[in-house]
Amino acid sequence: MITRGRFEAGQRINLNNRFGVIRLFENDLAVVKYEDGDGVMTCLPSKLQEAFKVKKLYFAVSKNNSEHWHPQLTEKQKMTIARRLSYVKAMDEYKEPHKKENRAAVIEIVSQEIHDLKPPAIASISRWYKPWRKNKRNDFYLLPGKGGRRSETHPLMYELMSTAVVKGYLKLSKPPKINAYQLLEDIYRKSDLKSIGLMLPSIATFNRFIDEWDRLDMIEKRDGISQARAEARSANKKFKTQRVLQEVQADTGHFNIGLLSECRKHYIGKPTIYFIFDVHSRSLLGYSIEIRDGGETPSGAQHAFKHAMEIKPNTTEYPMYGVIENAGMDNGVGYRAEETKTYLKEAGCQSLTYNIQEDTSYTSL
């Protein structure tokens, strides 16, 4: 049920289960044009106001509603929207945005501005631009969806479906999809959305909605954080690079093995090893080892990057070194620390990418 609205020309309403649009609302006259083609109703404005008070009149969502609203989004979806928005806004500055040379210029300029390592194809930005422009530049329509199904889902229904998925499907107990759909039916009945013309989607449509959910977010909620992190690391191996040091990945290994001093009298801690790998050559660039109790530290991460970028005595085993363009790493405290970011910036690194469980967070330096 939509309770917010105004008695003014252009407002869509539901009066006694009939949809119409207020054409005139003045001191002594109100005019409502019904959508079913059955004429026009004229009355005193007070009659509509009284119908609203006794719940015979509801304010309804406009058929052409394109309110700039976002449902509950995963971090990956937010980043997808932000990235695509950079390109479509640049296209929108041209009088002929779909001209090939204009699109090529947009890709060249924007990809450099946002440090996009994998710029989109010319056809892709046109595909993003058309529904965004058609729907009054609503960022919601930049969300990816198979065959555009997600874009066709009204934002209010999208919110209900998202709630049903989160509360009824994304659980470690791994409930079946039908449980989430039954929850959606219950939420829909209580929402009164039927009164504004929004119908409950079929179970097949709802199942497709679940199938299009962010994969890593689903793995985290149904299989646990550890499994999601493992999947994220696997996804990172698919980076396409053109040269050495364009993209490196940092990772940390924690070993639950207690070490003793040389005289075997004193416990000195557990080993933590920091690794820096080059994505293009798939070679180990450098590492560092800490022996202590507790988690990783900024100094351990910095020493690993330092070792990766400096010349080694044995150039046969470590033939590559130099300034790193983009450093990808997990969300550990050693990598997230401000001193680590400062160190990499001063060393000439252009950007950092943090793999945060289900998503990738990008930071330009």
Image (cartoon, grey):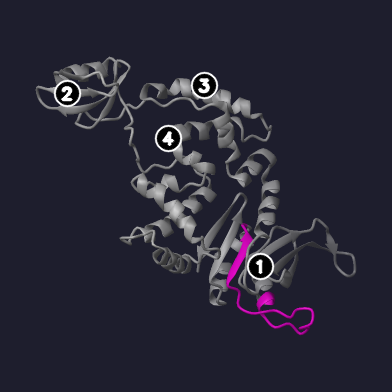
Identify which amino acid the numbered label 2 is placed on: Val
Q: Is residue 284 above or below residue 32?
A: below
Helix, strand or loop under label 3: helix
Identify which amino acid the numbered label 1 is placed on: Ala
Q: Which quadrant of the structure image shows residue 317? A: bottom right
Identify which amino acid the numbered label 3 is placed on: Asp
Residue 142 located left or right of residue 361: left
Rounded to the nearest whole Å, what is the CA distance between mark 4 and mark 3? Answer: 18 Å
Q: Which quadrant of the structure image shows residue 325? A: bottom right
Rounded to the nearest whole Å, what is the CA distance between mark 1 and mark 4? Answer: 46 Å
Residue lying at 18% horizontally and 28% vertically, measured from the top left: 23
Report which residue position mark 4 lands on.
154
Report which residue position mark 1 lands on.
301
Task: Give the number of the disc on residue 186.
Answer: 3
Give the mark toward the camera: 4 or 3.
4
Q: Is residue 195 above or below residue 133?
A: above
Give the mark toward the camera: 1 or 2.
2
